[in-house]
Image (cartoon, grey):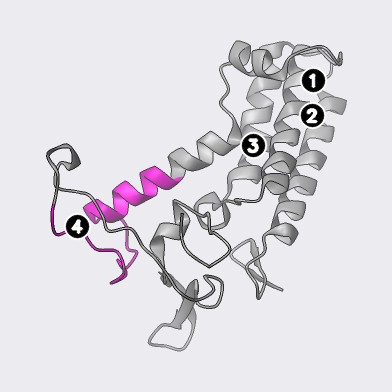
Amino acid sequence: MYKYLGVYISSDLSWDAHVNFICSKANRALGFIRRQLGKCSQEVKLKAYTSLVRPHLEYASCAWDPHVETQINQIEMVQHRAVRFILGQHGRLDSVTEMLLKLGLSTLESRRKNARLCLFFKIDKGFTPLITPRELQLKTVQRRADNGRAYEHCIVTQTPFSALFILKLSGNGTHSLKTWYPWVILTLFLPTWDVRGQLV
């Protein structure tokens, strides 16, 4: 287990430790808000949640966005507890989906997906210092609907966890954020693998 820039990375790239860490941190922040702002308005509670709790759940999410259902639900449960506190609705028959709509909040899973798409757009346009890996190639034949920016589907024959990230050293021998090189950059945007180790 190794912590780098606030993200816990394991040898098998299982995000259990990191998800447990951020959920624990977010729950502590939510507990503080519940103790201090219990009698405040919904607007104040909502602002406190979006500024003090949710950032813990979304920091560097483009790198660790989980595809395991249990981890996704574990993160979503933090927001579910928060919206129940904000609206003061704790009944078993109260719909969390309706509460999210009422507060104008999206699911954290959809927000992580949008963040990955934004990062992919920035990489495609050269707006970030990330090095575009050679595995990320435009299709040789573009359809009319592709607008000339369709990429090849990345297929790997080995386990995707063996070389997902390569941490290079900068010239002075120290770790540099700009030297993070995603071996398969599409795993930041489509982090779902089948049993054969293929990106689906």
Instruction: Give the class, few, some or many, for how many residues have Cα within 10 Å of label 3's Cα (few <14, many ≥20).
Output: many
Return the residue at label 1: 85
Give the CA separation, mark 2 to mark 4. 50 Å
Image quarter where the N terminus lies is: bottom right
Magenta span contains residue 138: yes
Whether 132 is among the magenta residues is yes
Instruction: Give me the residue at 62% from left, 11% from top.
Output: 102
Residue drawn at 14 percent across, 47 percent down: 148
Residue 181 image offset from top left, x and y in percent:
41, 72
For the point 87% across and 27% down, which residue is it?
A: 35
Q: Answer left or right for 20 relative to 127.
A: right
- Residue flagged by tag 3: what amino acid is it? Arg
SS for dot 4: loop
Q: Magenta region: which residues?
A: 116-141
- Mark 1 nearby-residue class (10 Å; few <14, some 14–19, many ≥20): some
Q: Earlier in the sequence, mark 1 or mark 4?
A: 1
Crowd band around label 4 with a 10 angstrom C-alpha radius: few (<14), some (14–19), many (20+): some
Give the residue type at disc 2: Ile
Q: Where's residue 150, x and y in %?
A: 23, 50
Mark 3 lies on residue: 54
Of residues 10 and 170, the one nearer the viewer is: 10
The front one of 145 and 50 is 145
Residues at marks 1 and 4, CA–CA distance in whole angstroms: 48 Å
Q: Secondary structure at mark 2?
A: helix
Q: Earlier in the sequence, mark 1 or mark 2?
A: 2
Measured in 3D between alpha carbons, the distance from the residue under mark 3 to the one under mark 2, in whole angstroms, is 12 Å
